[in-house]
Image: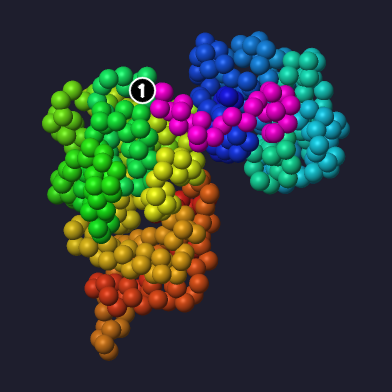
Amino acid sequence: MILIIDFGSQYNQLIARRVREHHVYCQIEPPDIPLEAIKALAPEGIILSGGPASIYAKGSPRVDKGIFELGIPVLGICYGLQFMVDSLGGQVLGSTKREYGFAELSIRKQAGMFSGVEKQTQCWMSHGDSIGELPDGFVITASTANTKVAATENVKRLFYGLQFHPEVAHTQAGKKMLANFLFDVCRCKKSWSMKSFVKYAVEEIRQQVGPEKVILGLSGGVDSSVAAVLLHKAIGRQLTCVFVDNGVLRAGEAKRVIDMFKKHLNINLRFARSGKLFLDKLKGVTDPEKKRKIIGRIFIEVFDAQARKIKDVKFLAQGTLYPDLIESRSAFGGPSAVIKSHHNVGGLPKTMKLQLVEPLKHLFKDEVRLLGKELGLADDVVWRQPFPGPGLAIRIIGDVTSQRLAVLRKADTILLEEIRAANLYYKLWQSFTVLLPLKSVGIMGDQRTYENIVAIRAVTSDDAMTADWARLPQDVLARISTRIINEVRGINRVVYDISSKPPSTIEWE
């Protein structure tokens, strides 16, 4: 496996994805991970990520310098390179010329990281500091017009550094460079697959849980469904799934989940009808972060109540994914910026009595889908579009009421019907409607109306870390708009969201 130290780069999750694309397992850890924990992980190599800090700034993130004495190959990227240089006796300086975006990389030595890479190639820079002096034993292996030390290495000690980002698509040969590090330098084997992950995860679940009982919140989405089947494979009847009707679900959701998991998969399932409780607590709340935290808190309270009905439950299982952790705070407590909290990360109360089991927390969404296929789940489940834990509450901008939920449910149902009819459902990452806290003037039956506006959001993506708005056919959009306005009382205008992520997020809240 490869250990990735998270220094706060917006790209650290991309490093992990690129490593796994080469069928090598990797794990992201914060810079405060103890050296003994690193030794216990026994990685074949260490990658130090980029980050927004300056190495000479007070409080800049640092990992134990003992990593350089382990005899393990180390690759430093951007800030990671600067940390390596500073730690080993070199010098990092503020640049007179900052370098952001595309740059032409001139390679001096087509070996090591650059084996099989053309001498002139495009790379992606994002830095304000540069290397002033290299430590003993290091040589320059590549430069750009503005950056003398664009790449460096100490072959004897297996240390490599890149001032640019090989993990982003804009670096043309980035994938090849990372492959060189993984296979030529670290001597990794291509052993990472969903089949191997199932074996590893089942053993890990059994070791963590032992003979104890586990309760899982089952929403029917891809994440919780795959987590449920994986846990069921590992511990069988020790698992009880609880489906919580939180009052902010889509139409027909409860029946679909109960039919699938209780009747077809024969998994222990309890149904908790708690919609009124959630809606009462959400009354008058318009701030999206407060909505998420309220839903997270009530969710756990309902679980505690259900757990008390099942004798001796010790663990709560969740379908938490890597992007959930990264967006909520940072990957495992690293120095990245908070984007938004997720119901299963930021909303957990400190008083929660159950221990957490998160068997998917090291996976990206596309990997979870592959895992679902490996576990034998139907395509209808595996390729289902993501639905947020806080449900329709964060697709209603402003106050969440029963009346506004009914309006949004009808609009959402029409949208999905038309998306499926056009054979677009599985081509899109997500498609949904958002009820805006705005009204507009319209005309219906020669009479003036003053009613709600609904926004349509449809995006394409590989893993939800980035996304582009979908170019839906105009005739499909026309049918959706016409049906919503004609069939949903209270809506007289439909708009289409043409924002990408970043700068926008996929969900509006």
Residue 190 is a magenta residue: yes
Residue 39 percent across, percent down from the top left: 55, 12
Q: Quadrant of residue 410?
A: bottom left
Residue 322 percent across, percent down from the top left: 46, 36
Residue 333 percent across, percent down from the top left: 45, 27
Residue 443 is a magenta residue: no
Residue 461 vertical placement versus 216 (above, below): below
Query: In which quadrant will I find the N terminus?
Result: top right
Q: Is residue 445 left or right of residue 103?
A: left
Q: Is residue 419 left or right of residue 446?
A: right
Q: Quadrant of residue 414?
A: bottom left
In this view of the protein, which residue sits in the foreground, 60 or 225?
Answer: 225
In this view of the protein, which residue sits in the foreground, 332 or 272?
Answer: 272
* Residue 338 seen in this snapshot: no
Q: Which residue is mark 1?
A: 206
Q: Which residues are magenta?
A: 178-204
* Residue 63 seen in this snapshot: yes
Mark 1: few/some/many CA within 10 Å (<14, 14-19, 20+):
some
The three-letter amino acid code for the residue at tag 1 is Arg
Q: Main secondary structure of the magenta part?
A: helix
Residue 47 vertical placement versus 277 (above, below): above
Residue 474 percent across, percent down from the top left: 49, 75
